[in-house]
Image: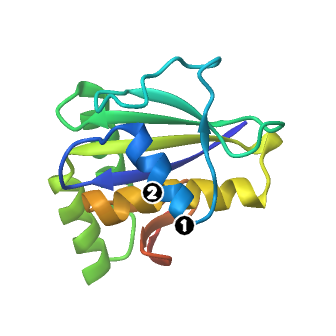
Amino acid sequence: MAYWMRVFCTEGEPPPLEDVLTWVAERGPALALDTDLIDVDPSSPGWTQAAISYRPEKQPFLAETIIATEPEAKEELDEFVELLEDAQDSPAKGNVLAHLRQTTFIVANQIPTSDFENDGYDSVGEFMRFFVEQNGGMIQADGEGFYEGDKLVVQLD
């Protein structure tokens, strides 16, 4: 079974993975690309999928970038707008909806819950924090909702 966490980004374009991994390493967790699972050029800004390892003996999480103009992204954005219809009206809900309308790309992270530990979640968190700080990102976690920083601002059931 997998758990999904996404970052909806409103600024710039997906950066090369080597930039993301260097930034994360400066803050603590050392992440590595699992190129045996998915072959990706770490210096390319045009990456679409990557397997990212937080510990060699554990399954990596899978990261995928989706440009907002692609049909898959439009479908995903529409799905979250629809989910938000059931959320209680609030200024935070309005902010999330506005953010979704301004999204230029999404970074979707698939986490293998059957073989993942707390330091893995911390690593994914730092990976996503790059996009929050560098690309105007807002985090969404399945079964939880939307976050501004570490604060859950709109809960989704």
| Residue 85 appears in the figure | no
Q: Is residue 42 left or right of residue 35?
A: left
Residue hosting label 1: 27
Q: Where does the image place residue 115, in percent across and percent down from the top left?
A: 81, 41
* Three-letter amino acid code of the residue under disc 1: Arg
* Three-letter amino acid code of the residue under disc 2: Trp
Numbered mark located on residue 15 in the image: none
14 up-or-down from 70: above or below: below
Answer few, some or many: residues within 10 Å of disc 1's Cα (few below 14, many 20 plus, some between 14 and 19). Answer: few
Number of numbered discs visible in the structure rendering? 2
Q: Where does the image place residue 138, in percent across and percent down from the top left?
A: 35, 63
- Secondary structure category for the residue under label 1: helix
90 up-or-down from 13: above or below: below
18 up-or-down from 125: above or below: above
The residue lying at 38 percent from left, 27 percent from top is: 48
| C-alpha separation, residue under disc 2 versus residue under disc 1 | 7 Å
The residue lying at 22 percent from left, 62 percent from top is: 99
Quadrant in the picture for the C terminus: bottom right
Q: Where does the image place residue 13, in percent across and percent down from the top left?
A: 21, 43
Residue hosting label 2: 23
Answer few, some or many: residues within 10 Å of disc 2's Cα (few below 14, many 20 plus, some between 14 and 19). Answer: some
| Residue 5 appears in the figure | yes
Q: Quadrant of residue 59?
A: top right
